[in-house]
Amino acid sequence: MNTAQEHALGKTIYCNSRTKCVIVKCRISCRRTGDPALKKKRILLLSEGFGAGHTRAAHALSVSLRQHSPNVQTKVLELGTFLHPTIMPIIYHAYRKTLTSSPRLYAMLYQKQNKMLSRFSQLALHRLFYAQTAEVIRQLRPDTIVCTHPFPNAVVSRLKRSGLNIPLCTVITDYDAHGTWISPETNMYLVSTPEVKNKLLLKGVPQERIQVTGIPVHPSFLTRHDRNAVLRKYGLKNMPTVLVMGGGWGIGPKDICEHLASWREQIQLIFCLGNNEKAIAKMSAEPLYRHEHIRLLGFTNEVDKLMDVSDLLITKPGGLTCTEAMAKGVPMLLYDAIPGQEEENCQYFIENGFAEKIDHIGVIDRWMDRLLHHHDELKSRRQSIANNVAQFGPAGWTRAILQTVNEA
């Protein structure tokens, strides 16, 4: 199966070499052939760009499904961005500003809205942003819809109440079960842990609709890369290494970065700055970060390889990033949890021994000392983390989704 290339409006979006769906002004026209491959099951994965993790999880599922079943076609869409490529980036920016400048406001809203979206809220979402969703679904004709973000999940749920007869699978990409994920129209929930399953049960979700599969990660996080090849590619040395990430939006607090840089003579540091071009320019200009043991990277699709050569990850407690680190067995130090879902994530990782919170600068010094003087202990800890998450994998989450398809 060949995945169609994506461009701006007027793009090819369907994923079969003999079938094209060309979009012009958000309308889709399909040209079909008599290819027997059209009998393959079509799975539409819908996400949103509020943070990078939701869409990465959708792509991880897409790859895993195609690898495990030759009779499946997949398509990933960030639904709001797809329908409103001009408006949605403005909304994403406003969301980010709220998180950074008014975290208490976000926390209040998160707790206040910790219940299933009302029908009025779902109607508002549909009217304002997703009115063309029904047409997209009608043209793509999926056999199952998988949502990795609550917004498209709410929209599809509303369409199902209006007569749409397509199974809906909801993949919760955090270690919490916020009420906005929940709708009676969801046929199956894929969740990270038994604890999240119990939270759904307490909210009235039937047990037979919940499967504990772990949060989906790309298969590249489940394999080991050649360490020496990665070191050569990035000009790294074979020495204790710390990977520092701040999500798709960039890097973390200045005081943490500067304190880490004070260890640069003994510890190798890789800063992944994402799409934060200002941070890249600013840090590149500072003498503190101009050192042979420091690498400043922008957005990269090779975090899996960087984790393979890193002994410690310092990051925000995003659900997917931390799950990827667990799959690699990398211990974590966590900072600046977003009030709400990231606080729940942080609690889970700490309670299960996968991470520690940076609540004072001495935590960093203690871990740097471990890297330098207790490396064998950390290697053992890394294997223990990897073993803990080995029970989950592509076979589990693909089986759950394919079960939903086959029962349709």
Image (cartoon, helix red, strand yellow):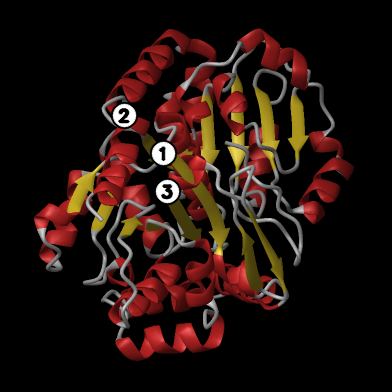
* Residue at which label 2 appears: 389
Determine crowd level at label 1: few under 14, some 14-19, many 20+ residues with C-alpha closer than 10 A.
many
**What type is the residue that disc 1 sits on?**
Thr
Residue at image x 54%, y 24%?
368
Q: Are marks 1 and 3 in contact (CB under 8 Å)?
A: yes
Q: Secondary structure at mark 3?
A: helix
* Residue at which label 3 appears: 319
Residue at image x 36%, y 23%?
386
Q: In the rendered view, tell whether residue 306 sits above or below residue 127.
A: above
Q: Are marks 2 and 3 in contact (CB under 8 Å)?
A: no
**What type is the residue that disc 2 sits on?**
Val
Left or right: where 176 falls relative to 22: left
**What type is the residue that disc 3 sits on?**
Gly
Q: Are marks 1 and 2 in contact (CB under 8 Å)?
A: yes
* Residue at which label 1 appears: 323
Left or right: where 257 falls relative to 336: right
Left or right: where 271 falls relative to 359: right
Determine crowd level at label 3: few under 14, some 14-19, many 20+ residues with C-alpha closer than 10 A.
many
Which mark is on residue 82? none
Q: Point out the tag, 2 or 3, that comes first from the N-terminus.
A: 3
Determine crowd level at label 2: few under 14, some 14-19, many 20+ residues with C-alpha closer than 10 A.
some
Q: Residue 190, how many percent across, how many down?
A: 28, 50
Q: In the rendered view, tell whether residue 53 sits above or below residue 365.
A: below
